[in-house]
Structure formats: structure tokens, C-alpha cells
Image (spheres, grey):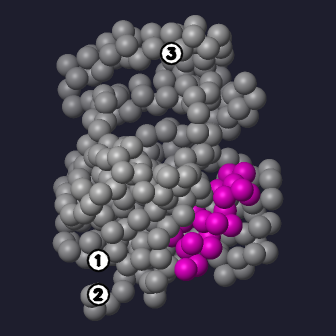
Amino acid sequence: MLVTYPKVVVIVLTWNSENDITECLVSLRLLRYPNYEIIVVDNASTDRTPNIVKHSFPDVTLIINKKNLGFGGGFNVGIKEAIKKKADYIVCLNSDVVVDEHFLLELVKVGELSEKVGGLCPIAYYYDQPNRINGAGGIVRIIHPKVFGCGEIDKGQYSKTKETRMLCGPALVLKRKAFLGIGFFNTEYFYGPEDMDIALRLLKNGYKILFAPRAKLWHKGRGAVGGKITPLIIYFHVRNFLLFVKKHANNKLELFFSILYFWFFDFPTILLKALIFGNKDYVDAAVKGIIWHINAKLLPSDEEMVKILRKR
């Protein structure tokens, strides 16, 4: 049992989340942890999300951004507020997530095991298949990151607390000292591998990431851009894969082979999908992802690209 209960601030990022936000916040209200606060950061929703939070959850701190700042930018707003509130642990939660009542208690128990712990990875399940694992830690790599347990039925095979090399995308959990040590989310991605980026930055700076198997959540998987392959998904995949490689390749040789992989496997795969599904917008989105690296000024802003590509 914990002798003291470090303060936890849970930040829920919303963007047109009216179908999910109530269930998410109700599950957070039921948490069996005595020292936590909830912040909702709304990325300029055009639906009823802010009104739902304001009227149904008046105890929650609501911050409404004037424009869509993306995944990292939106969470950075909440993190600054969490630091002002003197949070010891900060949980960056997707709005399409439901958490177990012991979620925070189990995370903090594991987090307090060592001063070297900077990040924590809960176990995630599929919302519509509550006993099927979505992720149980993993390994972040430049090419083919490995997620443990994805698609497996939980039979207790991931029941041990241990070091891992991946954070949980739907619920990024870090200690405040880690955020202060490595810096905030990189806003260049807008929507993409922020979880992998933060994980690598933690590890490179000497922090440990621990897997907390009894901290459970259920992820619907809709997220900000939907749960299926679309031109919008492809645009950010292409753009951010190349950006991630440039930031985290350990040497010129790794950079070379990563770019080679993109041109001779990843990009042709997108072309093949465009051919199979007869969707030329896939190719157009991929090309725009490449153009961003040549001259981003040739394209609309990230916020506008989301609006444009969501219509296709």
C-alpha cells in the first residue's frame, strides 16, 4: 500500500468528442484514488463537446483552445496547467478511453518503485472486445516498432511489472520531473508518433519506462482522425514517418536504410492500396506528405489540412 498519495493530474484531449467524452469522464470520476484532478483541453471542437463538459462535469477544469493545436500542442496546454497545479504524475488521455477504477492507484504504485522511473505504460484493451489486448508495452524502433500482446486474449501472460521501451498511445503517463527533464511534446508532428517520440526521449535521457499490468483501460480506437485508413491518415503517416526518422536515426547509415525502406516498401504499399481501392486521394495525400519536407509553405496549415483531407 502507498504511504502517501502523489498528486496526479489527468489531461483529456478532446476534438469533436461528443460521442465519447461523457463515458470517459464518468470512468475518471469513479477512480479509487484520493489525490487527483481532471483537466479537459478542447482543440476547438465544432460539436457539443465543450458544452457537455461544462454543464455535466462542472468539477472538471475546462480549457478551450481557439484553434486545433494537434495532439502534442493540445496536451502541452494541459501539461503547463498540470505543472502549475503541482502534479507529481501527468496522464495524457485520449477522449475515446474508459479506465478501470484502480487505474491511477496501480500506476502510482509502479511509478513509486524507483526514482529512475520517468514513464509508465498501462495495459490497453479493445473497447468492443474487453478481454482482447490492444497493447501491453513494446519496443520503439525507427522501422517496425513492436507492440506486445496486440490482438491476444488476456490469459494472464502479461501480468508482471517490468521494464518496457514503449508508452501507451491512448494514455501517456509521465512523472512531472520527466516532462521537465526532456521537454514537452513535439508539436511538429501534429498527429502521429508523439508516444514513440516521447518514449525514445525518455530512454535517451536515462529514464526508465515500466509496464503496469494492473492499470487497465479500454480504447475505442476512433481518435481524432478516425479508426480506418483515409487520406488524412496517409498524409500524417508519410509526413511523420520521415520526420521521426530524421529526428531519431542514430547515425547516417540508419537514416539511409530507413529512407530506403520508405521509398521501396512503404510508399509502394500506399500506391498499391490506392490501386486496389481505386482511391487516387491516397496517392495525393502521400505526395503532400513528401512535399511538406521539401517546403511546408506550399501546403495549408496542419489545421486546414485536417479539414481538407477529412472530407475525402
Q: Which residue is mark 2?
A: 2
Residue farthest bottom in this picture: 3
For the residue carrying disc 3, how many other residues have a C-alpha within 10 Å: few (<14), some (14-19), or many (20+)? some
Residue type at mark 1 is Lys
Q: Which residue is mark 1?
A: 109
Residue type at mark 2 is Leu
Please provide the residue range marked out in magenta.
10-30
**Residue depicted at x 54% and y 64%:** 98
In the image, 65 versus 58, the foreground residue is 58
Note whether residue 309 is visible.
yes
Indicate whether 269 appears above or below 228. Answer: above
**Residue depicted at x 49% and y 28%:** 237
What is the quadrant of the C terminus in the image?
top right
Q: Earlier in the sequence, mark 3 or mark 1?
A: 1
How far, Cα to Cα, is label 2 from label 1? 7 Å
For the residue carrying disc 1, how many other residues have a C-alpha within 10 Å: few (<14), some (14-19), or many (20+)? some
Q: Which residue is mark 3?
A: 270
**Residue depicted at x 36% and y 86%:** 5
Secondary element type, mark 2: loop
Query: Where is residue 130 shown, x and y percent of the image?
Result: 48, 57
Whether the magenta-drawn stretch holds residue 65 is answered as no
Decide: marks 2, 1 in contact (CB < 8 A)? yes
Whether the magenta-drawn stretch holds residue 20 is answered as yes
Query: Where is residue 306 shown, x and y percent of the image?
Result: 67, 34
